[in-house]
Amino acid sequence: MAALRINLEGAKLPKTDWSEAFLEHSRFGRTNLSGANCMRTVFTGADLRNAILHRASLVDARLDRADLRGADLTEADLQGANFDGADLRGADLSGAQNLVRRQLANALTDDTTKLPAELNEKLT
């Protein structure tokens, strides 16, 4: 299936269904995707800066090399999500569900990245 390269910067799309979509290199900066179904969605290399993914389902999503700086991932279900090479500086993952440390091993984080309480120690 061909990847869609769309630009939805700043759009309000809460609770939409993006499951299994190929959205590589798409632009979702400042987009509201709260509560969206993004299971198995491919966001490889996508721009998700300051996107709102609060309570979104990102189960088995591919977020490798995605720009998630400042994104709101609070209470999102991140089971099996791939963050290899993703930029999570300033992202808020507090309260995220099903996130384990190894998912963040190859992601870029800093002191402004907010993690769930159980992962709150330094990633280094």
Image (cartoon, grey):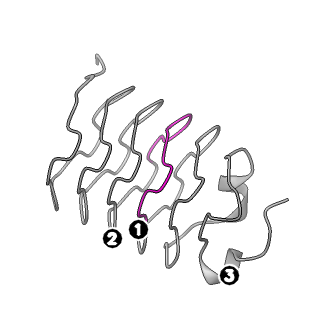
Pick the residue in front: 28 or 41. Answer: 28
Dot 3: element: helix
- Image coordinates for residue 35, horizontal then vertical, percent: 24, 66
Seen from this angle, which residue lies furthest top?
2
Q: Are dots 2 and 1 in contact, CB under 8 Å?
A: yes
Magenta-colored stretch includes residue 68: yes
**Residue identified by numbered label 3:** 118
Mark positioned earlier in the residue sequence (3 or 2): 2
Quadrant (top left/top right/bottom left/bottom right) for the N terminus: top left
Hey, which quadrant is residue 64 in on the image? top right
Q: Which amino acid does label 3 sit on?
A: Glu
C-alpha gap between disc 2 and disc 1: 4 Å
Task: Check disc 2: other Cα within 10 Å, few if <14, some if 14-19, many if 20+.
Answer: many
Q: In this view, does 10 lie to the left or right of 87?
A: left
Give amino acid for label 2: Arg
Give left or right: position of 55 versus 85.
left
Q: Mark 2 points at which residue?
A: 55
Residue range in magenta is 61-73
